[in-house]
Amino acid sequence: MIPRTRELDSTIGFLKDGYLFGRRRLDRVGGNAFRGRLMGRPVVFGQGVDAARFFYEGGRFGRKNAMPRSVMHLLQDEGSVQSLEGEAHRDRKAFFIDVSSSDDSRDALVAAYRRAWLRSLGEWTASGRVTLLDASTRVLTRAVLDWAGIEADDASIDLRTEEFGEMVARAGTFGPVNWRARAIRRRSEEWSNGLIEGVRSRVDANDSRADAATTPLEKVALYRDPTTGERLPTEVATVELLNLLRPTVAVARFVVFCALALHRHPAWRERLENGNDDRLRDFANEVRRFYPFFPVIGGTATRDLEWDGSRIRRGQWMMLDLYGTNHSPAVWEAPGRFDPDRFAGVNIEPNTLIPQGGGSAPGGHRCPGEPVTVDLMVETIKLLTRDTVYTVPDQDLRVSLRRFPSSPTDGFVMELGTGSVSDAVTRTAD
């Protein structure tokens, strides 16, 4: 049976304990799940491989009413792929995978990212000092706009950087801060709406076909529902374009954590700097496992279920502990140790490493952008160890486990210089 917590409502505890919320309560009640209340709503909270399989496989849980509206409106919004179920979700998800996760598409985005980084590097060096969280957010914004086929001058990139960055940074907030971020998102939606309508007007005026679409922007604007044969409503296509762009900018959190891990583990930096390319992906995956990204994912039961000797009724809210699963001693040996070697030569079971969700991308709700996230992190590690000369000055590098999503307190400040990368690393170590 799934035990209950003693708290009448755990909302304050969730905000207080942050990423450790699930682990601390499971330590008290035992097992891999507990029942409780969040925001006055009954919830089953699960952690670990079995919980991830139960949550993601078999179509047991959907996304209807699965997230607070404050989060939903910043990260997905109504009508988006993540809000759909069944065949409609599979069809739209297949489209997203085709646009964002094919080998050619991933290579193109990584190439755009490298160009944007190297273009910005001169500006960083001239200024002498940058905060990597802010700087990489802008680099990723420039890169994803370039990749999507969206022309943007510096002023437009600045606006989009603010908008995309706020959507991610404020997703875990409530009240006036969240309201401001949602107002900024509406500005972004107006911009996205103009792009969608512009493509459609141009295509319709020239009597062009949707299969002539070449850029991600055109593909979203001209996509037709396989069942109805109709284009997506403009407001839905507007949201889906943002859902193609914004997650790439969210990778800035992982960019910073790559830099922090290289700083904390200089032996690994030396190995990767010297061209040990076969370990880059292992390092990136350990960064994704070790450092906090989004803490939980929610779903609602699509039918009456039974799990762990307990009945879960249709409509029951369940939350899966992503961070807790990535740090569970039942899943990982010495989970508190940063150790990329744990991934060497290992085929990763899809419900063990779940910073971006579990299960499969084609048939479930796992993030379709996960493969390109890893690619961008691998490229980041190359850029930091082989192309960017910098030192790390004294600053607050603590990572709060009470802020969603988290990052080093000072955003990882870098002092840029000239010379060789290895000399810069030596100066930092000294």
Image (cartoon, helix red, strand yellow):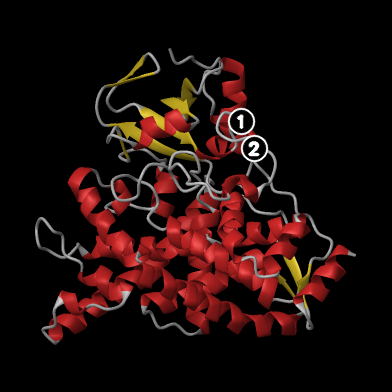
Task: Identify the secondary structure beneath mark 2.
Answer: loop
Task: Identify the secondary structure beneath mark 1.
Answer: loop
Q: Is residue 206 visible?
A: yes
Q: Nearer the viewer, residue 50 or 60?
A: 50
Give the quadrant of the N terminus. Answer: top left
Q: Does 108 sit left or right of 409 as displayed?
A: left
Circles 2 and 1: CB atoms closer than 8 Å: yes
Q: Residues within 10 Å of mark 2 (few under 14, many from 20)?
A: some
Quarter of the figure with residue 101: bottom left
Q: Residues within 10 Å of mark 1 (few under 14, many from 20)?
A: few
Name which of mark 2 and mark 1 comes first in the sequence.
1
Q: Does 364 sit left or right of 87 as displayed?
A: right
Three-letter amino acid code at disc 2?
Pro
Cα distance in 3D space between marks 2 and 1: 6 Å
Q: Position of residue 130 (x, y in %)?
A: 71, 72
Query: What residue is disc 1 on?
Result: 329
Q: Position of residue 71 (x, y in %)?
A: 44, 47
Query: What residue is disc 2 on?
Result: 335
Residue at horizontal 61%, vertical 45%?
342
